[in-house]
Amino acid sequence: MDQDEAYRRVWQAFRTFKTLADGRHDTADWRSHDGVYAVCVVRVPAAAVRPTLDALRQALAAYPQVRIHPDHFLHIALQELGFVCDRPGRPDEITPARLEEFATAAAGRVAETRPFAITLGGANSFQDAAFLDVHDRGRCGRLHTRLFELAAIPRAPRYPYLPHTTVAHYTADVPVDGLPATIARWRDQHSGTFTVTQVEIVTLRLDEPYPPLEPYAVLPLGR
């Protein structure tokens, strides 16, 4: 119920915005790092959210300030781990050894959760990105809490964790235009349901906007 209320507040806030915000993750700072970026995710199978997702994408693609996420990039982020490098100098950097240590510890925490169903939708939006709500009875939130404790990131997140599947980022600080009305057509529609049986730690190259989510470790849920 709290999660559903959070989505409602996000949607209400988006309808009051006069301008969008550039939400692209592949900034100059992102590209300036060496190595790869590591994050814990639940992959979202594109087939599970068709044809609703395709119709939403087509509508969003009509706006020049919208950049659509490709199928292979659809996911629910559970915990960001950081840029992998040999000599970390910032809170968002992690050594290969620490990443391996995290993967070993996380396997046990993830195994404490049984497989569960996720229903995606309706459509929603932050000021910088369009996304699908996640209906999972709070399972992703509980997994996030366990993984966050292990990650021991020495900084507080900017916003409370809210699971979501981003489908597009906005690329400029420009007027909202007709986006709220467009997204509202899918606000009350569920896109599809799939079963989560594993969590993955994946790495992303830093030299392109939507690189493959390369598997680093597969963490099965308990049976």
Image: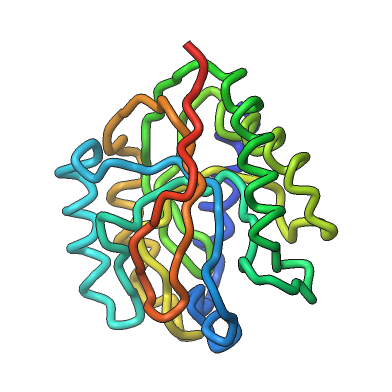
Give the residue displayed 62% in from the left and 55% down from the top. 80
Give the residue displayed 73% in from the left and 47% down from the top. 151
Residue 19 is at least partly visible in this image: no
Residue furthest right in the image: 154
Residue 89 vertical position relative to residue 194 in the rendered view, above or below: below
- Indicate the position of residue 175 as horizontal and vertical percent values: 45, 82
Residue 70 vertical position relative to residue 148 in the rendered view, above or below: below
Q: Quadrant of the N terminus?
A: top right
Count how many numbered circles sit on residues in the image.
Answer: 0
Q: Nearer the viewer, residue 53 or 196?
A: 196
Give the residue displayed 34% in from the left and 71% down from the top. 178
Q: Is residue 106 left or right of residue 128?
A: right
Q: Nearer the viewer, residue 119 or 46?
A: 46
Residue 71 vertical position relative to residue 149 in the rendered view, above or below: below
Residue 117, quarter of the rendered image: top left
Give the residue displayed 45% in from the left and 85% down from the top. 172
- Indicate the position of residue 152 as horizontal and vertical percent values: 80, 49
Q: Nearer the viewer, residue 65 or 85?
A: 85
- Indicate the position of residue 92 as horizontal and vertical percent values: 71, 67
- Indicate the position of residue 68 as horizontal and vertical percent values: 30, 67
